[in-house]
Image: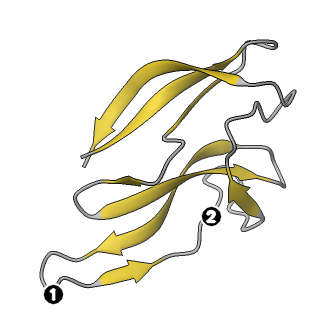
Amino acid sequence: MGSSNNYKCKNCDLFISASLTNTVGMNTKVLAIKCNDCNFVGDSIIEHHSEFNNKITSVPPVCDECGGKNVIKWDGKCPKCSSDMIDGGLFMCWD
């Protein structure tokens, strides 16, 4: 089961939800990404796992906000002011 946490910027009070690490659910693996085009931070699917034939398919990360592919692994910094984000704990569990 995968999970995402809430994060809050200690300077500008921006809230986001992301996993921060590679998180694996039943059928997918996600990576927390930051989009260099629109500054969106969130989870992006990077692998699909098939239960039927045990096949793993890699998927390039994509921004859920703008659809862009100019993304990097999120470093835990606020996309608005570059300050450290404070982990506010579990936001949701997903499969």
Q: Name the residue under label 1.
A: 53
Residue 47, position in %: x, y? Answer: 41, 71
- Mark 1 secondary-structure assignment: loop
Residue at image location 79% in from the left, 44% down from the top: 39
- At label 2, counting other C-alpha atoms closer than 10 Å, the crowd grade (few under 14, some 14-19, many 20 or more) is many
User: Is 83 left, or right, of 66 in this rendering?
Assistant: right
Query: Residue at left 73%, top 64%?
Result: 68
**Residue where numbered disc 2 is placed:** 62
Task: Say which residue appears at 84% left-offset and 55% top-offset.
Answer: 37
Say whether disc 1 or disc 2 marks the residue closer to the N-terminus.
1
| Residue 59 drawn above or below residue 45 | below
Q: Which residue lies furthest to the left in this view?
A: 52
Q: Label 2 sits on what residue type?
A: Val
Q: Position of residue 59 (x, y in %)?
A: 50, 76
Eye-nearest disc, 1 or 2: 1
Q: Which residue is drawn at 24% across and 49% down?
A: 95
